[in-house]
Amino acid sequence: MPETIRQGRVAEWTLHAAQSYRNPFADVLLNAILTAPDGSSHQMPAYYDGEGRWRIRYTPRQPGRWTLRTLPHPHDDGLCQEIALDVAPDQGRGTLKATPGRAWGFHWDDGQPAFLLGDTVYNLFGMAHCGLGVDAFLDRRAAQGFNLLRVRLPVSPFHPPEGHSSWQHRRTWAWGGSEQSPQFDRFNLEYFATVDRVVRRVEALGLGLEMIMEGWGFEFPFNARQRFVPEWEELWMRYLIARYDAFNCVWFWTPLNEYEYYPDGDWRYSPVADRWALRIARWIKRTAPHGHIVSVHNGPTTPPFAERFCQDPTAIDAIMLQTWGTTGADDGWLAAGIEETAARALAGWPGSALLAEWGYERNPGFELRMPGHRHCDVDHTRRGAWRGAFSGLGIIHGFENSWGPWGVLDRDQPGLAQLLYAGPVTTEIAPFTRLAPAPELVAAQELPPGHRPLALASAERDLLCYYMPVGGAITPPADSGSWGQARWFDPREGSLQAARPTSARAFVPPQGGQLDRPWDWILLLER
């Protein structure tokens, strides 16, 4: 009788080798060929999971009769299998897709648009492996309205300028051997069992993951390409794909955190890093059959990404854009320059994009390990979020409590509540699906950096939204007519109040803040 599995759900099969191998991670290549009802074939790599076991994970997208056939190299009777599968229909949104030019660039398989609101928890898997309260943290993030987490599959062993992560009391090296004597042809199965558990929890909560396959290029082994050679890199990435590509919660595969660190760990723009990113992106798409988004995360923002990847513009689906805006003692609160940098960096880019990093909110109770965070306060968190959203981008932030080296997962920092207002505003009050950046609606005038308002508008111009980083006054275009509803949204408190124009048709927000830090406001105009 055919085995029955469900459409859109992860199915798993276990095979036991008939013979033993010196190093099963590297000495055996096992693929599964899955043939769908429409005759299309999909190749899924299998992975070794210890004690002579290989596992295949796959998520079918079509209902009906499938077949699964394995191809082991070298031949092994225990790893040869042919199975008939009945895939029962199931309702679900499917996987996330990059859809540039539609809404803000992302939709589900069922056609529903997605506004992405994320948090950066680079060492989530390592924290779980060391016994931190990751489950409760994930439950809280889901309840708060986040839908995406940036995580790294390898654990950062340290954070500059010095010292190991405060939470780390157990080895989290993902390969065989050790950092001092690595064995890149083996993997730490105990660590990956923890990753499995966390990924399943994320899947059950309906959250998404940006799975960062290689960490910072200044860290070992990614700064030692003479040791972590392309053959070991491919073995590593293939193992990650085999183990996790089937999960719906894998929304993005990102090859390297700040990819320009390739090949030598030096933080600068390098054309050879572009060539590497294009090659790896194509390899991922050939190897990973579920069609998840392949993204790159940048350090430097120039030259523009359209220029960097023009040789193969469809290899990479999305840019995880990093740009922090101003972070100095006098201007960190403004997060000025994010929208201008995003516009330059993404000019002509044919794919999708997110504002995936604009700093990490500082917790003054911690030792200052990252001097660049010093002035990333609540105001920087909030203004950076709105500058990204008014650039037509989903947003992913991060907080020192949970970002990396500290691991305080049971408490949230003050800016988190203000960041969360971006979700209901862009999905309910002023639906992002109707809006696009409209800089032409802001009158040209000389203003200090970071003071210029930003605008979003519907195609019909029956919904206008203005973000005013320092208050001031805004006058809608003279031909925009009258407004049936005009409201101020307070991005600090999440409250709405009526807005009324002056006799000169200008809208002036309620006063507030200090002379050196006037409040920011959002003006919503509807016909």
Image: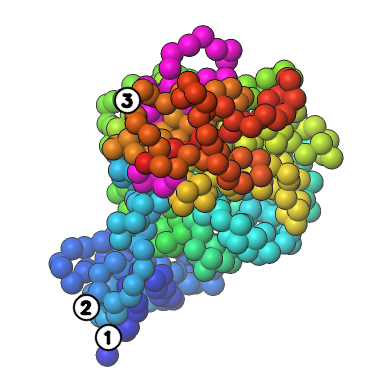
The residue at 44%/38% (across/down) is 525
Disc 3 crowd rating (10 Å Cα; few below 14, some 14-19, many 20+) is: few
Q: Which residue is mark 1?
A: 2
Residue tagged by mark 2?
A: 65
Say which quarter of the image contains residue 72: bottom left
Q: Is residue 128 above or below residue 385?
A: below
Q: Are marks 2 and 1 in contact (CB under 8 Å)?
A: yes
Give the colour scheme of this rendering. Answer: rainbow
In this view, the residue farthest toward the left is 39
Residue 479, numbered label? 3
Does the segment drawn in magenta span residue 227? no
Whichever of labels 2 and 1 marks the residue nearer the N terminus, that label is 1
Which residue extends farthest top? 446
Callout 3 secondary element: helix
Q: Is residue 475 visible?
A: yes
Label 1 SS: loop
